[in-house]
Amino acid sequence: MSKELPKAYEPQKYEDAIYERWETSGFFNPDNLTGEPYSIMMPPPNVTGVLHLGHAMENSLMDTMARYQRMNGKKVLLLPGTDHAAVATQAKVEKELVKKGIEKPREFYGREKLLELIREYAENSKATILRQIKKLGTSCDWSRLAYTFDEQRNLAVKTVFKKMYDDGLIYHGHRVVNWSVKGQSTCSDDELVHVERPSKLYYFKYSKDFPITIATTRPETKLGDTAVAVNPHDKRYKKYIGKVFNIEKFAGGPNLEIKIIADEKVVTEFGTGAVGVTPAHSMVDFEMYLNQKAKNDPINLIEVIDKNGKMTDKASNLYQGLLAEKAREEVSRWLRENDLLEKEEDILQNVGTSDRFGDIVEALPMTQWFIDVNKKVSGKEKSLKELMKEAVTLGHNGISDQKVNITPERFEKIYFGWIENLRDWCISRQIWWGHRIPVWYKGEEIYCGIEEPTGEGWLQDADTLDTWFSSGTWTFSTLGWPGFARATPGKPGSGEIVAGKPEFKNDLEQFHPTSWMQMGYEIVFFWMARMILMSTYALDQIPFKDVYIHGMLRNEEGKKFSKSAGNNIDPLEVIEEYGADALRISVLLGISPGNDSKFYDEKIDSARNFVNKLWNISRFMLLNIPESKIDVKIPELETLADKWILNRLLNVTKQVTDNIEKFNFSQAGEALRDFTWSDLADWYLEVAKIEGGKSEILNYILNALLKLWHPFMPFVTEQIWSEIYGNERMLMVEKWPMIEIKTKIEIKINEEFELIKNIITGLRSLRAENKIEPVKKLNATISAGENVELLKDNVEIIKGLARLEKIEIKTKIKKPETSVGFVVSGVEVFVDLAGAVDAEAEKVRLQKEITSVEPYAIGLEKKLSNKEFVNNAPVQVVEAEKKKLVEAKEKLEKLKQQLNIFY
RNA sequence: GGAUCUGUAGCUCAGUUGGUUAGAGCGCUGCAUUCACAUUGCAGAGGUCAGAGGUUCGAGCCCUCUCAGGUCUACCA
């Protein structure tokens, strides 16, 4: 059955229907597949808005992998989902409400009503996102769709929380935390964005008789100072250590009691070598406070800034109620006026801002929930920190196949560095959109549990959990945990055996640890680290075996795409104009793992062109295949070109396979594109027009080609497939081409075909240089040496592709007088131009070529006469160089002979 | 301050353990249109591989330093 395709590929006409066919086929659901389980969890996009190009890239990566694995006979689960994104979503909705004129949405609506509004927004956004994912062609199992904020995930979150609580890893503690005044909530260290800004460093003394000068960027916090820390080895200050100084009415305000303490971390060389310690408003100072407490030499903690960023009554009524920044001016002014300010210095300072609310974060002491990362996990003798490290080094519990492999490798180091500096993780947030902390209070009593406690008078903790707490459970909460994971001691994740179906395994058993995970480098700490923490702790398993870290897409100027910058690109618009396949290869090709890449018009243009090229290649091939067959073996190979293209096909199959296995999607696609466009379209199909009778081999190649391209460009390949073979079998579940290289690839075939190609290219080039019209047929003679038979066998190709009338091939021919010529691999080609030879031009051309070959030959000669090279280099290399020299010399000699004719 | 990435043709980038006269796409120049494809084909120009040292028979690739740009990170008060 031969079918003629339309002239151009119009993606809009086919894509939706194809997606529907895939979906209804059931093959997106692994339950309908057999083979070894292979699982990928989709990083759930935030329901804060719509997908952007970065998501298009992620979907392309995941889907390419999923389709490749499926075609390789794996039971593939690509599980889709969305993320409620706690702070991010609430911040977003509140921002829009503020824009509408509701200044304080939380006060205005109250908890229930505001939650309803956020929920509505989230559901809307979710629907859009899911539609976009389908448009991109992602082959995910919609029957397992998950949401980080649905009941199933809530159960998983509560279960982990309780386990950690019972193990004493989660504690309620009074510590200094990051506080966003604008968002009225805490945030974790990772949620800070450091911004560099100009600032002033003030050098001052607390009072005239205070012996040490202190430097600070925040004079207003000094109203809450309770100590000065110096290095214990600092000779200048040693004598003061342990002394207490009383300062009356510091800056006209409160009385201070300053104890001089010693701390190794104080750098003698920096500033004055002495640090004013404000335990309440600095993470570092708070740690000193804890240290002093532990040493039984306590210092006080005085809060002078409140949750609204204003000075408290402890700062005295002179400052109370002022915003911190205002108080800073006032304090420094007072110090200046009272001659206590010694110096002001302009410096650049890094301040932490809230990633969601944008304001500068205050350090405040508060009672919050924390995860202790240093405490030993019961029954493990390892802390969470150590678990996180072990999973990436030795493998979880020292088991090597429970090791997380990170690609590219360099992110391992970055990950370890982060672990080193990790502090206890503050997990409670004062926003409403999120998983409520499963803790209830009644007077002094505290209850932590999955269900609300029975009895009167219990009040649930008002706070919610950091969104990454729930995201951390993603790889297993999506697979039914804890439902199917009633733990059998020693065998985590073991489920129930269903009677009569002894082979039954639940999702968790089949698909966890997941096989492969991809994510952007910007969430390695947020997410990858937390998944490893949660999974190793709660399941005793790593979350995934391989994780691939990709870079960010930027625009032509290298800027981030963002809504606020106004350069956002909607993937749906790109798909509408160019098609999903074009979008997919434009974000997949031309990138390198872990590095940022640019997206711009020319890229998507050429991607679209290529999709169309493939369509037309198929179109042409089909015109030459009277009867398409679906399962074909390698046909008889008659001509050199046949052998060559098949060798190239097998070769590129291997390259594509190897590169996908190594997550080099870009290289895989590029190799395939080069094969398709150059080898196949530009050479072999042109040869096929001349040689004819290629039905079977074209059938075979087209079949393989569509399969190889399918993971990258699923729509166009599936469409072509169905145009050829009807709708009975789907390309999506066809077998990936086998690499059946029976005999080893014959280098000779390649070399021989290269010679033919070079002769043709040389003839075309000669024609162009001599400005001979393309239609004019030429006569050529070839002095072929030992290649006579080869060239005679392929004479029709040469004649056809180089547009020759007559060709004469002999072992040795002298250059005819009225001809021009060139030399390639020992073969001399002459073209008779009769009177049309431009002797001067020909002389110049020959001379030019001689001057390029001569130094090359001399270089080779030198190299080969170097004994050290000959002795040290591998034999193959030396042999190759010798061969090159022989050829170069031969070529040089022939060129010189040709040139001599003119004299 | 520490870490890390990047620097290859006008532009965007490949270049896998060191071994052809360093490649591709876009752009540019010239030519071609009843041919599967102008969303095309053919031919061509264009590079001291950021710079300087070093290791090696041999370096775009390994080592050291310098310069430029980016990113992450930190308790410079």
Image (spheres, rainbow, N blue to C red):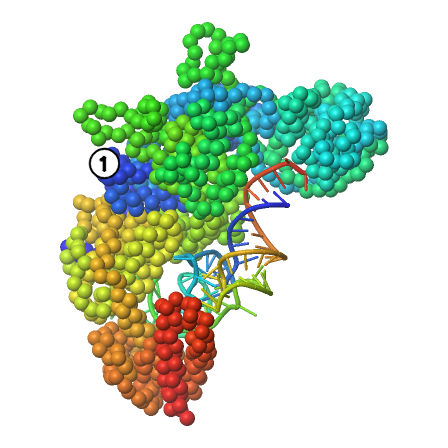
Tell me: residue A336, above or below residue A172: below
Q: Which residue is mark 1?
A: A32
Q: Nearer the viewer, residue A876 or A46?
A: A876
Dividing the picture into quadrants, the one containing residue A627 is: bottom left
- Asked if residue A309 shows in the view, the reply is no
Q: In front: A581, or A710? A: A710
Q: Residue extending furthest bottom?
A: A903
In the displayed structure, B41 sits above or below A45; it is: below
State the image coordinates of residue A255 (x, y, percent, origin top left): 78, 21
Above or below for A543 versus A816: above
| Chain letter, disc 1 residue | A
At horizontal 26% and vertical 36% (from top left) the residue drawn is A30
Answer with left or right where residue A459 lies relative to residue A578.
right
Quadrant containing the C terminus of chain A in the rendered view: bottom left
Q: State the residue at coordinates (33%, 73%).
A: A758
Instruction: Classify residue A476 by image quadrant.
Output: top left
Decide if residue A247 is in sight here.
yes
Residue drawn at x 24%, y 82% as measured from the top left:
A809
Quadrant placement of the N terminus of chain A: bottom left
Q: Nearer the viewer, residue A258 or A845?
A: A258
Mark 1, residues whose alpha carbon is within 10 Å: few (<14), some, or many (≥20)?
A: few
Q: Secondary structure at mark 1?
A: helix
Amino acid at dot 1: Asn
| Relative side of A623 to A848, left or right | left
Work out whether A857 lies above or below A487.
Answer: below
Residue A210, percent from left and from top: 81, 29
Q: Residue at x 43, y 36 (%)?
A: A391
The percent position of residue A359, horizontal first and vertical second, equals: 61, 33
Q: How many marks?
A: 1
User: Residue A441's x, y, as percent?
Assistant: 50, 12
Looking at this view, is A536 or A232 the one in front?
Answer: A232
